[in-house]
Amino acid sequence: MQYRKFCEEEVSILGFGVMRLPILEGDSKKIDVEKTEEMLDYAIEHGVNYIDTAYPYHGGEGEKVVGEYLKKRGIRSLSL
């Protein structure tokens, strides 16, 4: 993975976008948490440390899922 310095941190040039996570029952607010966690695990294991999210993604549920994932994995800080 390649990184660039941003605000004194080394940030991966490839990020993980949260705008379109896998969903259940065709409902964008029902995120497939298991599949999302698999995807995030893969990205992080391969050096991604930039996760792009915003409140409107999945009706506010995207940030919640990513926050719980990071908390569960113990990797909430910017530097992985």
Image: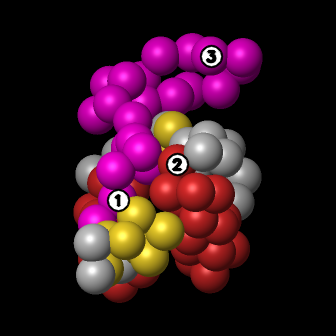
Q: Is residue 70 visible?
A: no
Give how far across and how far down residue 37 sits, in percent: 39, 74
Local crowd size for mark 2, using a 10 Å CA cut-off: few (<14), some (14–19), many (≥20)? some
Q: Is residue 22 visible?
A: yes
Which residue does the numbered mark 2 point to in the structure image? 57
- Does the magenta-highlighted stretch encompass residue 37? no
Tell me how the rendering is colored. Answer: secondary structure
Q: Residue at x 64, y 74 (%)?
A: 68
Quadrant of res 28 = bottom left
Q: Residue at x 31, y 79 (%)?
A: 24
Give how far across and how far down residue 4 sits, in percent: 47, 16
In the rendered image, which quarter contains the N terminus?
top left
| Type of amino acid at the residue the image marks with label 1 | Leu
Between disc 3 and disc 2, whose residue precedes?
Answer: 3
Between disc 3 and disc 1, whose residue precedes?
Answer: 3
Residue 21 — which label?
1
